Amino acid sequence: MKKSKRIMAIGMMLIFILSTFLLAACTPQQPAPPAGTEPQGEEKEPVTIDIFQFKVEIAKELEEAAKAYMSENQHVTINIQTVGGGDDYGAALRAKIQSGAEPDIFNIGGPQDVEDWKSRLEDLSDQPWVNQALEGVLSGVTVDGKTYALPFAVEGYGFVYNKAIFEAAGIDGSKITDYAGLEAAVKTLDDKIKAGELKEKFPNLVAVFDLPARETWVTGLHASNTALSQEFASSLDAFAAKTVEFKHAEALKNLIDLQANYSPNAKTKAKLNAVDYATQVDEGIAIERVAIIQQGNWIYNGVKSVDEEVANNLDILPMPIKGVKEDSIPLGVPMYWAVNDKGTDAEKAAAKDFLNWLYTSEKGKDYIVNKFFFIPPLKGFENLEPKDSLGQAVKRYAEAGKTMPWVFMGYPTGWGMDVLGVEIQKYLSGEIKWEDVVKNSKAQWEEMRK
């Protein structure tokens, strides 16, 4: 759902994030007034704030959090609109603002988005959560010493897999640490599925993977990041780059082909371009129709709503860049909360207060960890470790130092989804060859950087 001082390598920063999360101390928060009451002696003018956010996985829970906040701040009305999943949030945000219905809180993704939306970003440098931010998580939204957004969370992604299916096939997922191991496991699963050996225990299981090529953020952003994070050390480096070499394009092709060749549409790959997030997640891994999908810890809540037992059986395999970095997962900040500086003083004050409440009050922090299933980007959550299976998996990779940075936030605006993701769709449909994907995408990066 993107120029500041040079920071230490993001990879080292991300390794540090979750250990800091466990050990750092935090200044105690002042208790909030009892629900449904306002501070004595204060009568505040009614104010409405509109939130336009992309994370469909927390839509319901965010609404509940807003209601909890409003019960404590009865002069505030919060309206929330969620656009994400299969929709282009960036395009929807532009349309929203062009319509004149500007949200008070919206989402940005890093250095490129900071540049694109700079005229509407309120300076949040004086907010109390800034001093609680974990090392490095604000680097992509800090320019000339000013911080313009609050990080959502720390997230990791890779190949999410069903441990029960792996165990039934005699495969130990914890031993898979390179491309060869992954490929061997996939072939074993495929053989057993086709032979009907897993049918009795998993009657819905039809293929190893499902690849949602319709979701160009999955292919053009997340998948490509595994290769380009070996070329750029951080999103800031990607943002500053006038060209892209695509040194490890062949390794990316391996990951795309592996998913496509062992999907239900292996013989008709063009059909993968119609596969969306819901098909892959809710109608895929959640019902055990497939054993592995490329996604991250954010899917836990959605899978849990379909089948809690399946959700608790999920873990994450690495996304191996063959011959380069094979035992790691990408780890980073998915999006940031920004406050629109075009709002009135009252709207901006309420927007800031809600975000502070959400990330620093005890009630808000409970929503962050136990309802949103976020890995917090701030100190002060030491007593609220992730309890969900995928959050624990991300934490395990982070603590082991098996991570790679998120650099896609520094891609030219639209390049990942509208250029590379679309080129991959053409490749899957047989319109072009992989070398054309690489050539065309490299040319467009250079053109968009002019």
Image: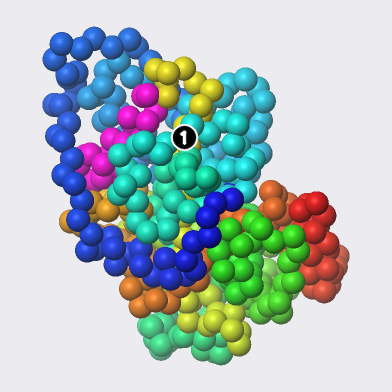
Query: Tag 1, which secondary structure?
Result: loop
Amino acid type of the residue tagged 1 in the rendering: Asp
> Compared to 201, does 64 lie above or below?
above
Q: Which residue is mark 1?
A: 123
Residue 60 lies in quadrant: top left
User: In this orientation, which residue lies closer to the viewer: 197 or 207?
Assistant: 207
Horizontal arrangement in the rendering, residue 178 relative to residue 315 (left or right): right
In the rendering, at what x and y percent does residue 393 appear?
A: 36, 70
Q: How many marks?
A: 1
In the rendering, at what x and y percent does residue 394 appear?
A: 38, 67
The structure residue drawn at horizontal position 42% and vertical position 18%, both measured from the top left corner, is 345
Main SS class of the magenta portion in the image? helix
What are the residue bounds of the magenta stretch? 349-368
Query: Is residue 417 visible from the viewing direction of this image?
Result: yes
> Compared to 96, does 404 lie above or below?
below
In the rendering, at what x and y percent does residue 20 appear?
A: 29, 63
> Compared to 326, does 367 lie above or below?
above
User: In this orientation, which residue lies closer to the viewer: 238 or 430?
Assistant: 238
Query: Is residue 264 visible from the viewing direction of this image?
Result: no
Tell me if residue 246 is in the magenta stretch: no
Horizontal arrangement in the rendering, residue 205 relative to residue 225 (left or right): left
The structure residue drawn at horizontal position 39% and vertical position 52%, both measured from the top left corner, is 153
- Looking at the picture, the colour scheme in use is rainbow
The structure residue drawn at horizontal position 62% and vertical position 20%, both measured from the top left corner, is 100
In the rendering, at what x and y percent does residue 93 appear?
A: 60, 34
Q: Residues within 10 Å of mark 1 (few under 14, many from 20)?
A: some
Residue 234 lies in quadrant: bottom right
Residue 15 lies in quadrant: bottom left
